[in-house]
Amino acid sequence: MRPDKLIELCKNKVVWIQTHNFPDPDAISTAFGLQKLLEHFGISSRICHEGQIDKLSSVKLLTLCGIELSPYDSIKDEMKPEDMIVLVDCQKNNGNTTDFIGDELAAIDHHPTVVQIDYEYSDLRITGACASIIAEYYKELDIKPEVKVATALMYGLRMDTLQLSRGVTEFDIEMLGYLFRFVDRKLLGELETNNMEFTDLRAYGEAIEHARVFGKVCLSCLDFVCPDALVAALSDFFLALAEAEVVVIFAKRDNGYKFSFRSERSDVDAGVLAAEVLEGWGNGGGHATMAGGFVSSENIPGDKLYLFDMVQEKSISVIKAKYPQIL
């Protein structure tokens, strides 16, 4: 759908731009780019989310680009049922998207659709980054993005595609070229450096200690609470191993366990693998190359002391039935 239809839909409404829970740089930059685009047409909006912003790269993006996000707890008394919500980098009824009070009239996302919803405006397509879609809106509408908007969008694009090495499409490359002329390269450099904290080393050490490899599959776990973003980073870290082409890793959360799945094989879909491994325990899904999931504490089968063994057994069982070639 053309972005001018979204502009018309937003006029004369109270507009909220909602990211998925625990927003990453792609979600944040997408929301920011859309907010500034609406502002160009005289439409005010606020960006909202639920969950902590626990990734250093996300915090740096917010700080250096002056982006304001409102946690749901701080605005739920303001939001009305008739207010318009534009979902970005997520879709309604996904496991990582909380149902807010407002009316989800629009969705802009690059993930596979889990539950079909009849939005008044939808732009749902498989791309490497959702930021690329917003970049195209500026190009189609012939609006020059502000320097911080262009820089944020390029950063979100590069981060979600792992520096153009994961899930990237020709469309992403085209939008990267479009954004290039508008970015602040010094600011982009600041965003892309020093994105690990000293405390992260503990997670890397424990994940390495627990790592197990079966054929081309690497599994690991963390016995302590750790940010979702760090769990995802550890998945990418293990995928760099010559022995690993598929990764399954999970870590404790206050109310359960966060799972991350990765695949660099064309014949192994990480989203399908996540859904099947976590079926009956919790929920999982995502892209063919990267996916995630969550299992609440009360749904853990058996003794939690042996959870890693249970996850290993179920993962290998699913892989053996569906993808025996990698074992």
Image (cartoon, rainbow, N blue to C red):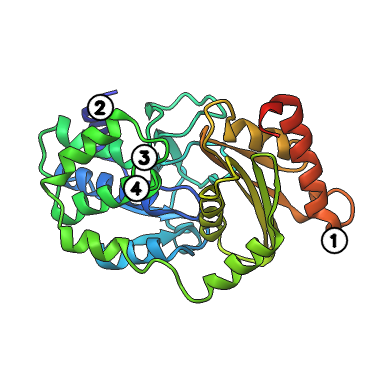
Q: Quadrant of residue 63?
A: bottom left
Q: Residue furthest right?
A: 302
Q: Which residue is mark 3?
A: 129
Q: Marks 3 and 4, how far apart in space?
A: 11 Å
Q: Residues within 10 Å of mark 1 (few under 14, many from 20)?
A: few
Res 206 seen here: yes
Q: Marks 1 and 3, how far apart in space?
A: 37 Å
Residue drawn at x 79%, y 39% as measured from the top left? 314
The tag earlier along the polypeptide, 3 or 2, is 2
* Circle 2 SS class: helix
Residue 242 rendering spot, x and y as whole percentages: 55, 46
Residue type for callout 1: Leu
Q: Marks 2 and 1, how far apart in space?
A: 53 Å
The tag earlier along the polypeptide, 1 or 4, is 4
Q: Quadrant of residue 123?
A: top left
Task: Please report contact status of discs 1 and 4: CB closer than 8 Å, yes or no.
Answer: no
The tag earlier along the polypeptide, 2 or 4, is 2
Q: 268 or 99: which is nearer to us?
A: 268
* Circle 1 SS class: helix
Residue type for callout 4: Gln
Q: Marks 2 and 4, how far apart in space?
A: 32 Å
Q: Residue furthest front?
A: 242
Q: Marks 1 and 4, how far apart in space?
A: 37 Å
Q: Residues within 10 Å of mark 4 (few under 14, many from 20)?
A: few
Q: Which residue is mark 1?
A: 305
Tell me the mark number nearer the camera, choosing from 1 and 4. 4
Res 31 seen here: no
Q: Is residue 174 above or below residue 193?
A: above
Q: Which residue is mark 2?
A: 5
